[in-house]
Amino acid sequence: MPKQVPNPNWKDLALGGAVIEPGSAKYNRTGDWRSERPVWTDKRCVGCGVCSIFCPEGCITMIPDKTLDNERGYRPVTDLEYCKGCGICVVECDKRCRVLECIVMEEEKV
Amino acid sequence: MEKYNVDASLLDVYAALLLPKEDVVASGHRACQGCGEVLAMRLVHKVLGRNTIAASATGCMEIISSPYPESAWKIPWIHVAFENSASVASGIEAGFKALMRKGRYPKRKINIVAYGGDGATADIGLQFLSGAMERGHDMIYVCYDNEAYMNTGIQRSSSTPLGASTTTSPAGKKSIGQQTWKKNMPEIIAAHNIPYVATINPSYPFDLARKVQKASEISGPAYLHAYASCPTGWRMRPDLAVQIGRLAVETGVFPLYEIENGQYRMTHEEEELRPIRDYIKVQGRFRHLTDDVINSVEERIRREYLSLAKKASPSD
Amino acid sequence: MGERKGIEVSIAVAESASACDVDCIAAYPITPQTHVVEHLSEIVADGELDAEFIPVESEHGAMSACCGCAAAGARTFTATASQGLALMHEILFIASGLRMPIVMIVANRALSAPINIWNDHSDVMTERDVGWIQLFAENGQEAFDLVIQAFKIGEDKRVLLPVMVHFDGFILSHVVEPIEILSRDEVKSFLPDYEPAQRLDVDNPISMGPVGMPPVYTECKMVTEAAVRGSYGPIVECFDAFGKQFGRRYKPVETYRSEDADVLLVTMGGISETAMSWVDQQRSQGEKVGLVRFRLWRPLPMDDFMQAIKGAKALAVVDRHFSPGGPGGPVAQEIKYMLYNSEQRIPVVEFVAGLGGRDIYFTDFDKMYKRAKDVVQGAPIPPFELIQARGGHYGEV
């Protein structure tokens, strides 16, 4: 379906002004909101997935990776296009895994 | 549901991978960084999955997820007005019921969810929610409680806790902020004798997942009251949005329980409640409170917690 | 052909919705619409109509639930009056904006204060801007027929708008009239099953009711204007098709003995029948009067109206609502809009009567006719007048 635009011609609107592409929020890349970004230390990560559950953006995905030296064989991948830099992943990783500084926040370079 | 029966306090760190991988709320939504409400909503809908229709009230979750032409929703979604998501969901439920019975739509189970914030649920929408619950529609209502009208600029609601400073109940020389106690929505809805009422908290994702799963499986109305932290409105660090949910449970401010056909059950118990100052000190909205107010609040929280625990185990 | 019988108009309206095989009814009782809702719940309870009857907790809840039903793709019906219509006001705009083809019958009743359960048009006229198609019934048969046609119009893929059918509270709703009741099979050949153009479907998810920011809101309103205005064609088509099939053809503007009239009375709704009897009486005395009535109110049938009043020397408009401190009654205002830039700029003499169930008698029409006749003979056009107010509108008369 053709992409809907913020300033359409009235004849191009869908019925009732509906948004017909599911999940079209993906075109809004919220990554530029952040002033700092989370950085993982692969060696310390145990692949538990806690960061991926608690990310409000849902931008951390756990992908299987047997090459890594962690028990579960998963590692987190952050989609930096959407990460708003809230820092929840850092706090939760600390609290749950007690693996300190597995994730740290680094200032975003301008 | 077995896979969600994980003890919330000793979260098996590896169990996180058991939650469904797919999100039906897409990234790119416009919630504040560290928004606890969108986290709760994301987790609820992760469990409910694609076979769901959502009716939204006006509020944070509606505004951030549907600015034309962007929509974060990968499931069918409708927003009508502020107070009536429960009525709209009643209509959707009745509509599909009639169509399936008359053979005009294939018979299938669809989760029908209505949601709103604390303002939409406890204040302007109370009548509509009450009606929908009383009529017994097969639907779920989720209240995302961030304890004020956050979307319009942090004004008080009947769900704002005593002593919190909001823009319409500001702390001042002659006021401690909110002057009344938080309205107990789960109890109000439980009095409608619906099959299932529960409190959920995104900081306890497995408890949340189990309860959402249960709500979707029972036939009839289910009410879920979700703790939704708001770093913006509560004046706290966004990275503590999940930690604060844990503190709310550990201090007894937000007990985790369920009421199934009138039977109360604590789904998470604390041996000893943490002092309420641990919860209050990280939030700027309580900054102005004096010791005597805090002490009386703590006393009431603990009293209510005990009476709730008693309801859950009446033999004691 | 259907069965002709003496039946209370409210019951007939309920039977009409039943003949259309509605899927969902979400309604709240309010005098004088209660019999419609009661009968519908009876026939659902007896299994005569297979529908979901949602006993909502207010009219606002009723319209909200109707939006939900229509969004699910079900044929939806509701009924209200007066305070109820006012209560659901905010949702009416939304139902139209979201293009939900809901049909609502309104038993016109006065708005409080003071509280008054009897008939006038204050509830209707305060809902002119909501973007619904609006039709007026003048007798029981019309109320029955218009509900069926309302579904056909609203569900037409070129229209997809909610429709209100207005019938006067008590004056129509509670009287027994001879009405031909069509059966469900007869109606089905005219009104096929509802196929929604857009619905909430887990196999094809969409988001209805997003935030319309400034860059897009104007365009959305343009769509509403185009939709309501553009529904005129399908409405006339529907009237013609109904006439062909069932023998009763309706028109957007109806006239009665208006061809060579000097003064034309303009009315809407139930009082039109009284007005017709009065016109007959006047004509028998040699007076050149006629009657013009709006059956279609929104979209406003401007061409039809201008055609209907051709040749008249003055109009006497009977409004049943007015804007206090404002430019009088809404029907007169809209007529003046039509006349202002046209060549037929004839005097419009405005009256407000029949408020809160006050009966309108021949003597009232006589008074109005006298004023209009004076204007035709050169008297200055008077301002709008509440012609039945004891104490007079402009001082004691």
Image (spheres, rainbow, N blue to C red):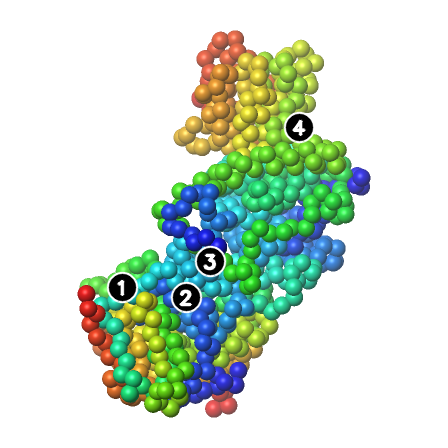
Q: Earlier in the sequence, mark 1 or mark 3?
A: 3
In the image, taking residue B38 as reference, residue C53 lies left or right, namely right
Residue lying at the far front of the rendered structure: A67
Name the residue rendered at 38%, 66% in the picture: B27
Label 2 or label 4, whichever lies nearer to me, is 2
Which residue is disc 2 drawn over?
B26
Residue B138, image x, y percentages: 58, 68
- Residue type marked 1: Asp
Q: Chain ID for label 2?
A: B
User: Element under label 2?
Assistant: loop
- Residue type marked 4: Glu
User: Element under label 1?
Assistant: helix
Q: Please state which of residues A93 and B191 is positioned toward the viewer in this rendering.
A: A93
Which residue is disc 4 drawn over?
C273
Label 1 or label 4, whichever lies nearer to me, is 1
Instruction: Judge the density around disc 1: few (<14), some (14-19), many (≥20) Cα neighbours within 10 Å.
Output: few
- Residue type marked 3: Glu
User: Element under label 4?
Assistant: helix
In the image, taking residue C156 as reference, residue A36 lies left or right, namely left
Dot label at residue A8: none
Q: CA distance from mark 1 to mark 3?
A: 23 Å
Q: Chain ID for label 3?
A: A
Which residue is disc 3 drawn over?
A21
Residue C309, image x, y percentages: 57, 19
